[in-house]
């Protein structure tokens, strides 16, 4: 998979792990379309990228959601409360015109050891 990308999917510098935007797509790069399913897929992709560092979502300090439809905000908020304990990570939520592979959401994260 690394050969597909001219960048790191996740990179550590000084105990901080930077996770590149993880689009909500399946293994064949087909977009996952349902509101709940696409947000879950983005969270799961970030979790998979943190795992090789021995980390999970509990180590995330900051997220940025890129969505093609701002109406996903309610679903993102619902899952944020479910997946993160207080104090929850800082978050940015940005509507964009398009995400690669036709995905509806992409999630990037910054985590710490």
Image (cartoon, rainbow, N blue to C red):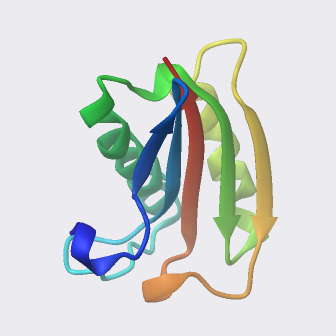
Q: Is residue 78 left or right of residue 20?
A: right
Q: Which quadrant would residue 63 be assigned to in this image?
A: top right
Q: Residue furthest front?
A: 14
19 above or below 65? Answer: above
Measuring from the top left, give residue 86's x and y in whole percent. Answer: 68, 12
Q: Which quadrant would residue 68 be assigned to in this image?
A: bottom right
The residue drawn where x is 28% and y is 33% is 51
Measuring from the top left, give residue 91's x and y in whole percent. Answer: 76, 41
32 above or below 62? Answer: below
16 above or below 72? Answer: above
Q: Which residue is more in the foreground, 110 or 92? A: 110
Measuring from the top left, give residue 75's x and y in whole percent. Answer: 63, 50
Q: Which quadrant would residue 3 be assigned to in this image?
A: bottom left
10 above or below 81? Answer: below
Task: Give the total number of marks visible in the rendering.
Answer: 0
The residue drawn where x is 51% and y is 57% is 20
Q: Which residue is more in the foreground, 43 or 8? A: 8
Quarter of the image for the N terminus: give it: bottom left
The residue drawn where x is 64% and y is 87% is 98
Q: Residue furthest top?
A: 86
């Amino acid at each position: 998979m690394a050969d597909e990308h001219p960048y790191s999917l996740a990179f550590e510098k000084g105990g901080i792990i930077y996770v590149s935007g993880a689009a909500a797509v399946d293994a064949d790069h087909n977009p996952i379309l349902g509101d709940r399913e696409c947000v879950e897929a983005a969270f799961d992709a970030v979790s998979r990228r943190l795992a090789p560092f021995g980390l999970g979502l509990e180590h995330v300090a900051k997220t940025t959601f890129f969505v093609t439809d701002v109406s996903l905000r309610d679903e993102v908020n619902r899952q944020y409360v479910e997946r993160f304990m207080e104090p929850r990570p800082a978050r940015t939520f940005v509507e964009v015109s398009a995400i690669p592979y036709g995905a509806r959401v992409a999630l990037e994260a910054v985590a710490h050891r």
